[in-house]
Amino acid sequence: MKKLFFFALPLLLISCKGVEQYRAGIEELASNWGNTTTSITDFASSVSNDLSNYTKAVAGATLDDADAMKLKPEQTAAWDAA
């Protein structure tokens, strides 16, 4: 096991030496990732707010039982169709 470790250690050090050339790309990706995450989070909260507003609007558009009793049959049919 020691022999494998001492064989792999120089290979690891040599392979990590070329990482510096990709630093700018990695940092740019990290900053873009943060901006993208922020915009997606904002969009998701906007959709959630819209959904709750639509749910409230639909709940407010229901017809009370007392008002439904006052409607004529053709009006009740039109309301149900809508």
Image (cartoon, grey):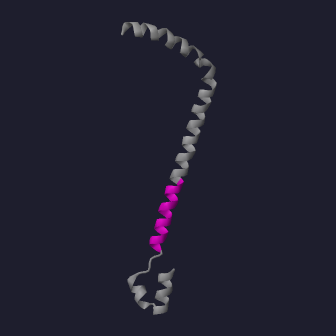
What residue appears at the point 49 percent right and 8 percent down from the top-left corner?
Answer: 10
Q: Which residues are magenta?
A: 46-60
In terms of image quadrants, where is residue 5? Answer: top left
Residue sitting nearer the eye, 64 or 25: 25
| Up-down relation of residue 48 to residue 59 (above or below) | above
Coordinates of residue 50 in the picture (x, y in percent): 52, 60
Task: Report the side of 62 relative to 39 (left or right).
Answer: left
Residue 72 in sight: no
Residue 41 in sight: yes
Coordinates of residue 22 in the picture (x, y in percent): 61, 23
Which secondary structure type mostly characterizes the magenta part of the structure?
helix
Magenta-drawn stretch contains 66 = no
Q: Quadrant of the N terminus?
A: top left
What residue appears at the point 58 percent right and 41 percent down from the top-left corner?
Answer: 36
| Up-down relation of residue 6 to residue 69 (above or below) | above
What residue appears at the point 47 percent right and 82 percent down from the top-left corner?
Answer: 80
| Up-down relation of residue 10 to residue 69 (above or below) | above
Coordinates of residue 81 in the picture (x, y in percent): 50, 82
Magenta-drawn stretch contains 50 = yes
Task: Report the side of 17 relative to 6 (left or right).
Answer: right
| Up-down relation of residue 79 to residue 48 (above or below) | below
